[in-house]
Amino acid sequence: MTGVLLDDEGTIVIEDWDRDLEAWRKIEGEDDGACFVVDGLDAISDAAEGVLTIHFSYPVNDEDLATTFALQRVNLTLNSASSDGHWSQQKQNRLSQVLFEGAKRIHPVLAAPNSVVFTFGRRYDKRNLPEAAVYQFRRS
């Protein structure tokens, strides 16, 4: 939600917590070219609502989704999912371009580091894209 509020019309330096260094670090690595594998896009293309799961750093748990949503789902799974694969701003910007196509209202579910979620929020344009519902996940 913070990314949506700040939008993408200005320059923002994004940092994330590096668990190995135990310090904040700028998002400035090389783009590794990893892409999303898309599954279920046909099922949601004409739906009023749908769930968009983004498996960036680890898989989204199907059991957790089943307790919350009874909607068609599009799965975007990074072909090289890793908890340490988010250090390129170019990669985050490129991957965020595939978001928000299809249904009139989407429920995005992201399994990703904070900087990725923030970048995807900044790329969401509420004037031209489907309505998005925002949630905070809490296990159980």
Image (cartoon, helix red, strand yellow):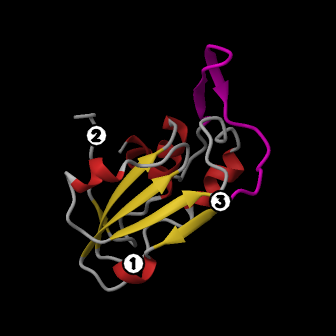
The answer to whether 28 appears left or right of 46 in the picture is right
Earlier sequence position, callout 3 versus callout 2: 3
Q: Is residue 97 above or below residue 92?
A: below
The alpha-carbon separation of the residues under discs 2 and 1 comes to 23 Å
The alpha-carbon separation of the residues under discs 1 and 3 comes to 19 Å
Question: Residue 94 got which mark?
Answer: 3
Residue 70 horizontal/vertical position (percent): 20, 65
The alpha-carbon separation of the residues under discs 3 and 2 comes to 24 Å
Residue 40 horizontal/vertical position (percent): 43, 75
Q: What residue appears at the point 51 percent right and 62 percent down from the top-left corner?
A: 76
Give the magenta range: 13-34
- From the viewer's side, name the closer residue of 136 and 83: 83
Quadrant housing the C terminus: top left
Residue that badge 2 annotates: 136
Q: What residue appears at the point 58 percent right and 39 percent down from the top-left corner?
A: 12
Q: Report which quarter residue 94 is drawn in.
A: bottom right
Q: Residue 58, can we see it?
A: yes
Residue type marked 1: Gly
Residue that badge 1 annotates: 102
Q: Residue 134, can we see it?
A: no
Q: Report which quarter residue 88 is drawn in.
A: top right
Q: Main secondary structure of the magenta part?
A: loop
Residue type marked 3: Arg
- From the viewer's side, name the closer residue of 76 and 120: 76
Residue 42 horizontal/vertical position (percent): 42, 83
| Element class at badge 2 | loop
